[in-house]
Image: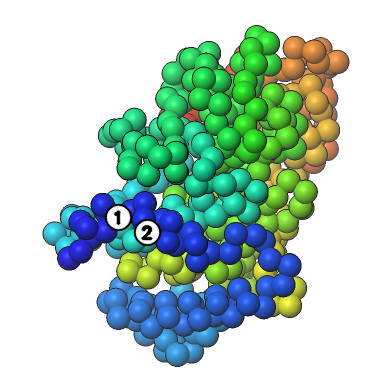
């Protein structure tokens, strides 16, 4: 009923929520885990009042009072993309939700999914993104941010709000689809303190700068979002954009739930706002397995145990979960006729140990042929022929059966239609 008013107060909700959040990765997690438990219990009670979740609770034979910790959420079923798509799709055109925000995923893993957020939920989600910046040492209130245009925004330029006129929560947008030189000029003119775009979009600019010698403004912090960052990617970004790279993990459906700081080798979960669990094929907690995320701020239309499609490794210390490695959802698998697979993680060392490769994508055409799109550093030590031999021999030592390779040498690998770039595309 009050969603229309809430929309107009979004920036004030953002500031209020931001003030209640932890702005640093804590050294002692006892307080934040107590807060997580309280919010988990509140979420379970509210979810049980919603028919969609009441059915899921009852089917699992679980009562709301049995959900007391983040780990207890695994007593409930995993929420798949197909289930979310069907549920939200049945709601989004109802008059009840006319003043809610309806976001849509890019469709990188299949048919796009619509997600409804009440204005207060959306404000919290945005505040949480600003909190990511604070955890890195950036002040989103007085700093200057620049990002790609959201494909679902009809008027991305018209964002001068009352607060922004006074230099607060400044946010400029750049057309990521424009020619590289035009995008770089816009960044250089704006000189943002924080820059974020899809990794592939940012990589396109970096490759252009490296090839032409054009300089790009070094933001204090920049975040190549939505796709896995390899060590080769990281080195190239630092070379062209400076040392301020961060790795924030999340999804359009959930928001940013974890953060890996530049000097850390693990992702810390924002435990006051999210539960991140890793489960096996039976939905039980596991050291390695599928990532499921529960945003604790999303209580009006919850997402409980939402499976984003990634796999990860998790370690637990004093009841706190840390993600130590992530297998990005945009990476398909190399597949064999007998059903076995080889993941991108298994071939990563071959790419990471070769600085001559700037970009690479593997397209498995058949069970015995891989098409390789590749961008070579202009200062590469190895010739094209030597790189082809290096990749063919090194990869076939890893694969479970030998492949034939065909190579396509490129200046830049174009992103997929959704603006992202899959490292492995399996067409079999």
Front residue of 344/318: it is 318
Answer left or right for 162 relative to 308: left
Quadrant of the image containing the C terminus: top right
Write down the residue under mark 1.
Answer: 9
Image location of residue 124, percent across then percent down: 42, 59
Residue shown at 43%/67% (left/top)? 297
Answer left or right for 67 relative to 332: left
Image location of residue 278, percent across then percent down: 62, 66
Write down the residue under mark 2.
Answer: 13
Front residue of 7/183: it is 7
Quadrant of the image containing the N terminus: bottom left
| Rendered view: 376 above or below 329 | above
Answer left or right for 355 relative to 121: right
Image location of residue 118, percent across then percent down: 30, 60
User: Is the image coloured rainbow, by chain, by secondary structure, or in one colour?
Assistant: rainbow
Q: CA distance from mark 1 to mark 2?
A: 6 Å
**Are discs 1 and 2 less than 8 Å apart at CB?**
yes
Residue shown at 46%/82% (left/top)? 41
Image location of residue 217, percent across then percent down: 62, 23
Of helix, strand and loop, which one carries label 1? loop
Answer left or right for 231 relative to 312: right
- In which quadrant of the rendered view does residue 83 lie? bottom left
Residue shown at 80%/39% (left/top)? 349
Q: Which mark is residue 275?
A: none
Front residue of 248/94: it is 248
Task: Please indicate, yes or no, whether residue 33 appears anywhere in the rendered image.
Answer: yes
| Mark 1 neighbour density, 10 Å: few (under 14) some (14–19) many (20 or more) | some
């Amino acid at each position: 009923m009050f969603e229309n008013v809430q929309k107009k107060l979004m920036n004030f909700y953002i500031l209020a929520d931001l003030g209640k959040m932890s702005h640093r990765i804590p050294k002692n997690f006892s307080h934040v885990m107590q807060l997580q438990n309280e919010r988990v219990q509140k979420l379970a009670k509210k979810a049980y009042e919603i028919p969609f979740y009441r059915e899921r609770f009852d089917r699992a034979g679980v009562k709301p009072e049995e959900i007391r910790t983040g780990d207890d959420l695994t007593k409930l079923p995993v929420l798949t993309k197909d289930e979310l798509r069907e549920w939200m799709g049945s709601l989004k055109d109802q008059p009840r939700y006319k003043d809610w925000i309806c976001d849509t995923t890019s469709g990188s893993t299949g048919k796009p999914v619509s997600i409804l957020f009440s204005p207060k939920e959306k404000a919290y989600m945005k505040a949480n993104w600003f909190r990511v910046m604070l955890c890195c040492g950036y002040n989103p209130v007085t700093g200057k941010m620049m990002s790609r245009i959201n494909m679902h925004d009809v008027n991305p330029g018209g964002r001068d709000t009352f607060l922004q006129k006074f230099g607060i929560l400044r946010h400029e947008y750049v057309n990521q689809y424009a020619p590289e030189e035009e995008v770089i000029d816009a960044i250089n003119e704006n000189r943002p303190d924080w820059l974020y775009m899809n990794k592939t979009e940012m990589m396109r600019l970096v490759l252009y700068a490296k090839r032409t010698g054009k300089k790009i403004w070094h933001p204090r912090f920049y975040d190549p979002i939505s796709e896995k960052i390899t060590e080769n990617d990281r080195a190239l970004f630092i070379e062209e954009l400076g040392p301020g790279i961060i790795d924030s993990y999340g999804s359009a459906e959930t928001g940013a739930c974890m953060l890996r700081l530049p000097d850390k080798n693990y992702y810390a979960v924002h435990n006051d706002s999210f539960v991140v669990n890793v489960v096996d094929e039976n939905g039980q907690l596991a050291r390695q397995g599928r990532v499921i995320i529960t945003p604790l701020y999303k209580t009006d239309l919850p997402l409980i145990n939402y499976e984003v499609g990634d796999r990860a490794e998790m370690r637990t210390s004093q009841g706190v979960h840390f993600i130590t490695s992530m297998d990005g959802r945009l990476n398909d698998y190399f597949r064999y006729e007998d059903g076995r697979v080889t993941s991108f993680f298994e071939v990563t060392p071959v790419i990471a140990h070769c600085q001559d490769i700037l970009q690479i994508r593997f397209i498995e055409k058949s069970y015995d042929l891989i098409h390789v799109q590749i961008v070579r550093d202009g200062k590469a030590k190895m010739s094209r022929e030597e790189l082809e031999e290096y990749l063919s021999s090194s990869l076939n030592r890893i694969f479970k059966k030998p492949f034939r390779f065909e190579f396509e040498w490129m200046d830049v690998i174009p992103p997929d239609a959704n603006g992202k770039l899959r490292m492995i595309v399996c067409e079999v």
